[in-house]
Image: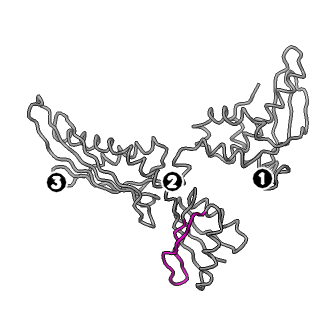
Amino acid sequence: MTKSLTLVLAAALFTAAGCGGTRKSSLNPAYETEVVEAEGMSPVVGGDVDGARKAALGDAMKNALGLVVGVYVSQDAMVSKSVLIDESITSQSEGYIEKYETLKEWRDGDFYKTRIRAHVRKEDLAAKLRNLETEPQKLGNPVIGFDIKESANSKPQQTNYAELELKNRFSEAGFITGEADKADIVIKGEAQTSFNTREGLGGFVSYRAGVSLSAVKQGSQETLATEQESAGGIDLNDAAAARASIINAAKKAADPFKDKILKALREKSIVRLNLSNVKTMNDLSDFTKLLRNIPAVRASWVRGYNGGVAVIDVAMHKGGAADLSQLLMKNTTRTVKINRTSSYDLDAELQ
């Protein structure tokens, strides 16, 4: 009987770390494999020991792959995508396992059990996992914050109808939402509504609202996208009609605005790098050459250099600050210490 994938994930980090590690592929040294040990089992039905042995081996391979998946995918993502991952990846375990050796196999009552050591191709698996990610995750998984002022009939209101509607829409699209002061991208703007008419509405009231929005990256203050929309709202009283009009305008703006932000992130994957301990212009020149020699870096621009601190915009072909930080730490030309990383900002120090 195949174990549920979710049951092995809880112990994934401990088991994978305790039993294996990262090694160069024996087939292609440019690639890496994760070496893990896993156990599988299958019932012996009708005395068919050979059939149970094959099934137990398949279960062990599937569980070995599940251990590696558990290391590279968050538990939240595993819960939300457990069926998809089970069908798309672990059901094709042989395609991701470069080689394996049987450590032990035995019959235990009505079950046949097998324990293996497997070499899982990390690059192939990572590529497949990326295809299962949402679009925001592929683009750095930025946290979206909101700062939207609302007014009715030219009077400021302490309401947040537009913000709540936009937050729901962005969350449904896979974005992480949070507080504006801690976000990577802030949605700024205004939502204004005013009385329209009550004539011919059978006792109902009509309001008309407009929203004006801009998406701004924290740190660089780069504007990624803008959007304007308007919509009406009808209800039994002024307050309810005003609320309905703002919600309708925000709802109308949400999808095209979200698409514009995603398009801008795909085209402008720019990381703001704050590099300290840059003692001379020669150091800065050498570092910019290092950056431009990283294949994942499309281009870079020095925005400022003062007091040993250089501010550099780094355009990535793909990914965000976390990806750049890993690449900088792995470089062998010049040691770089990473002090802080967000989705699109990175504080580092030359050593």
Tell me how far mark 1 sits from mark 3, CA to CA.
62 Å
Q: Quadrant of residue 77?
A: top right
Q: Dot 3, how many residues are within 10 Å of its Cα: few (below 14), some (14-19), or many (20+)?
A: few
Nearer-the-camera pick, 322 or 113? 322
- The percent coordinates of residue 124 (x first, y second) are 72, 45
Q: Quadrant of residue 198?
A: top left
Q: Secondary structure at mark 2?
A: helix
Q: Residue at x 72, y 39 (%)?
A: 66
The residue carrying mark 3 is: 154
Nearer-the-camera pick, 118 or 254? 254
Which label sits in the foreground, 2 or 3? 2
Q: Answer left or right for 153 relative to 13.
A: left
Q: Dot 1, how many residues are within 10 Å of its Cα: few (below 14), some (14-19), or many (20+)?
A: some
Q: Answer left or right for 310 relative to 91.
A: left
Say what amino acid the circle numbered 2 marks. Arg
Q: Residue at x 51, y 49 (%)?
A: 136
Q: Secondary structure at mark 1?
A: strand
Say what amino acid the circle numbered 1 marks. Glu
Tell me how far mark 1 sits from mark 2, CA to CA.
28 Å
Outermost residue, left side: 199
- Majority secondary structure in the magenta region: strand
The residue carrying mark 1 is: 32
Q: Answer left or right for 175 relative to 65.
A: left
Q: Quadrant of residue 207?
A: top left
Nearer-N-terminus badge (1/3)? 1
Tell me how far mark 2 sits from mark 3, CA to CA.
38 Å
Q: Is residue 157 magenta?
A: no
Nearer-N-terminus badge (2/3)? 3
The residue carrying mark 2 is: 266
Range of magenta residues? 297-314
Q: Secondary structure at mark 3?
A: loop
